[in-house]
Image (cartoon, rainbow, N blue to C red):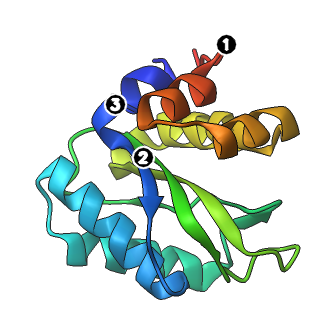
Amino acid sequence: MTLAALLPPAHVFLGVRAADKPRLLQELARRAGTALNLPPGEIAAALTAREALGSTGVGAGIAVPHAQLPRLAATAAFLARLERPVDYDAVDGRPVDLAFVLLGPPAARAEHLAALAAGTRRLRDPATAAALRQAPTAAALRDRFLAELDIS
C-alpha cells in the first residue's frame, strides 16, 4: 500500500486555523469526519485520548496525531498546513504548523504503524518540511509530501 493511496487530494488542507492544540484536534477531526462520513466528535475524542498518552508533536513544527477507530473500514491519512503555528506541547517546545493525521481500524495495526512511520520520516526530513511550508496549493503540498515515498 502506498501512502499516496491513503492520502487522496481531498485529504490535504492548506490554511487550517486553530487557536490552540485542542481546537486544532477538533478542526482536524471535523475535516476528517466530513471526508470519512464519521462523527467528528468520535474522531476528536480518539485523537485527544491518544494525546493524553503523550504529545504527538515530534518537533521541528510537526505533529502526527493518530488514532484507531473501530468504525473505520480502512486506514486514512490527512495532511494539513496551518495558517499560523499553534502551541502543541511538542517535544522541542516549538509550535506546530504541519500535521499528518492518521486514522485506522484496530485490525489494520501493521498498516497503521507502517504509514505512521513513513509519514513521520517524510515530515522530519528538513528539505521536505521546508518544501511543504512553501507549497502554493494543496495539490503542491501533497505532491511534495509524496515525492519518492512508498510504504510497501
Residue 92 visible in this rendered orientation of the protein: yes
Q: Position of residue 74 (x, y in %)?
A: 28, 38
The secondary structure type at the circle numbered 3 is helix
Toward which corner of the image does residue 134 lie, by quadrant?
top right
Amino acid at dot 2: Phe
Q: Earlier in the sequence, mark 2 or mark 3?
A: 3
Amino acid at dot 3: Pro
The secondary structure type at the circle numbered 1 is loop
Kindly report the distance in space between the C-alpha atoms of the residues bearing marks 2 and 3: 9 Å
Q: Residue at label 1?
A: 148
User: What crowding class fits label 2: few (fewer than 14 Cα within 10 Å), some (14-19), or many (20 or more)?
Assistant: many
Name the residue furthest left: 37
Q: Residue at label 3?
A: 9
The secondary structure type at the circle numbered 2 is strand
Say left or right for 61 vs 18: right
Front-lying residue, 144 or 42: 144
Q: Position of residue 149 (x, y in %)?
A: 64, 18
Residue depicted at 46% across the width and 36% down the height: 137
Does residue 118 lie above or below 120 as drawn?
A: above
State the mark number for residue 78: 2
Q: Nearer the viewer, mark 2 or mark 3?
A: 3
Front-lying residue, 71 or 44: 44
Q: Earlier in the sequence, mark 2 or mark 1?
A: 2
Q: Position of residue 8 (x, y in %)?
A: 34, 29
Amino acid at dot 1: Glu
Kindly report the distance in space between the C-alpha atoms of the residues bearing marks 3 and 1: 17 Å
Toward which corner of the image does residue 60 lie, by quadrant?
bottom right
Residue depicted at 43% across the width and 37% down the height: 138
State the mark number for residue 102: none
Q: Earlier in the sequence, mark 3 or mark 1?
A: 3
Kindly report the distance in space between the C-alpha atoms of the residues bearing marks 2 and 1: 18 Å
Front-lying residue, 47 or 84: 84
